[in-house]
Image (cartoon, grey):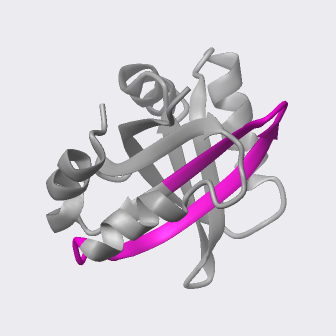
């Protein structure tokens, strides 16, 4: 089965970089039945940047609004899901490099049972070119 590459919308939240902030927001989303395709958090400038990649953008926006979680502007990234194998993302990254598209950030994990996933970002000016090059849905 070939890898599935999707263009995905995501929203960034700037939060205090303190214990429990991420789980507080995740509980809000869980309780609102918001499914996330990916979630990323890291320190940034004395605060934390949290990225929510939702299955349903409107469900995330509605839940965040009710909980007074201020979402940043909608941005775009790419999600890859596929069968795990040695060098699973090498060909994809090679295509981007050949096309002179720089990957801004990337997180890859094995999902167990022979599956893997990747979330990656490119500059906004490269989103359409990346989507076309990779045949992203």
Along the line of sight, the residue nearer the viewer: 35 or 30: 35
Q: Position of residue 102 (x, y in %)?
A: 33, 76
Q: Is 107 in the magenta? A: yes
The residue that appears at 36% across and 22% down in the rendered structure is 58
Q: Quadrant of residue 43?
A: bottom right
**In this view of the protein, which residue sits in the foreground, 128 or 40?**
128
Q: Is residue 57 above or below residue 38?
A: above
Image x and y of residue 71, in percent: 41, 47
What predominant SS class does the magenta segment belong to? strand
Residue placed at 16% from the left, 52% from the top? 128
- State left or right for residue 15 relative to residue 79: right
Whether residue 106 appears in this view of the structure is yes
Q: Nearer the viewer, residue 64 or 53?
A: 53
Which segment is the magenta one?
Answer: 99-119
Above-or-below relation of 28 to 94: above
For residue 60, above or below residue 123? above
Whole-percent x, y for residue 82 in the image: 60, 36
Q: Quadrant where the N terminus lies?
A: top right
136 or 47, nearer to the observer: 136
Residue at 36% over, 53% down: 72
Residue 71 visible in the displayed image: no
Is 52 a magenta residue?
Answer: no
Q: Provide residue 96's location: percent of width, then percent of height.
A: 32, 67
Could you tell me how many numbered marks the image carries? Answer: 0
């Amino acid at each position: 089965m070939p890898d599935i590459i999707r263009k995905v919308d995501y929203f960034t939240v700037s939060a205090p970089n303190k214990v429990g902030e991420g789980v507080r927001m995740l509980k809000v989303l869980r309780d609102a039945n918001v499914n996330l395709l990916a979630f990323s958090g890291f320190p940034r400038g004395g605060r934390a940047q949290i990225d929510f990649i939702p299955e349903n953008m409107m469900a995330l926006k509605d839940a965040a609004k009710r909980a007074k979680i201020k979402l940043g502007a909608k941005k775009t990234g790419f999600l890859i899901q596929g069968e795990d194998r040695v060098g699973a993302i090498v060909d994809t990254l090679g295509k981007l490099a050949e096309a002179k598209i720089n990957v801004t950030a990337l997180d890859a994990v094995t999902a167990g049972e022979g599956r893997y996933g990747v979330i990656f970002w490119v500059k906004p000016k490269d989103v359409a070119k990346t989507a076309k090059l990779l045949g992203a849905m």
